[in-house]
Amino acid sequence: YFLNNQTNPELDRILRFDFCPLLRAVLEDGLRQHSGSLFSRKVNLWRLIDLTTPLNSRFNEAKVKVQTDSSTNADWIEKFNSFVYQLLNLHELAGWLTHFVLHRTVLKTYYESWAFLLVNSNKDIFECLTNQLEKLSPLSFRLRYTSLSNSRITLTNQSSILPKKFHVRTWLRERKTQVKISPKDTISSRVSTLSQRHKSNLVPVSNRHEKL
């Protein structure tokens, strides 16, 4: 079986409105709007992904897939979301994040000195983050990112499952002294729960009666 967001709108909603925005917020912490003067090209995560992705890599495979599938008027946030979907399909999300933070020269150019990625890349909090993402690696994703207008999410379900007051910067600050993040508080655990629920639904009816 596969975790398919085309047939599971709840999965798509969690990824689109919670997982991708939270990951993006962590990666954007301390990101400068401009790399140099105010007249220089505006910086965004997609540009940094482009700068740090090796041509002969699985990460580039995901990037090329995004560029191929995206419409000409797709903004960089849609491209970033699609990139995350593709990395999940390839079981490479945690690997990509580790690869991304190793580009210290690039990060120092485009991020403030107090940015999360520069301050915490060698600390327990970053290891906690990658450990949470690693929990998604064994899952068999078959995701396809589409614009919101073409997705199966209804108008009434275009919302986050997290509290409205949730703020990533506050979350990071609160966990500076913590080594462990409770699994029940993470989006990765929610996706894993969806996976287990999907598995149970695939058990034949006869087998369920036998267990009972």
Image (spheres, rainbow, N blue to C red):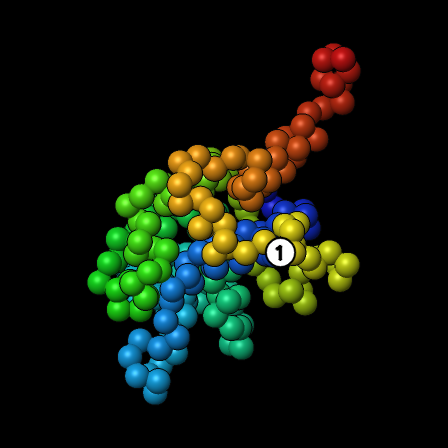
Residue furthest to the left in view is 105
Q: Which of 21 and 16 is in front in this view?
A: 21
Q: Mark 1 points at which residue?
A: 165
Rendered residue at 62%/56% (across/down): 165
Rendered residue at 72%/17% (across/down): 207
Q: Is mark 1 on a helix, strand or loop?
A: loop
| Left or right relative to 37: residue 73 | right
Q: Where is residue 152 in the image (x, y as percent from the top left)?
A: 70, 57
Q: Where is residue 122 in the image (x, y as percent from the top left)?
A: 28, 45
Q: Where is residue 174 in the image (x, y as percent from the top left)?
A: 47, 46
In the rendered image, is residue 130 in sight?
Answer: no
Q: Which of 19 and 30 is in front in this view?
A: 30
Rendered residue at 36%/51% (across/down): 97
Residue 159 against residue 186 in the figure, above or below: below
Q: How crowded is mark 1: few (under 14 residues within 10 Å), some or many (20 or more)?
A: few
Q: Where is residue 157 in the image (x, y as percent from the top left)?
A: 73, 56
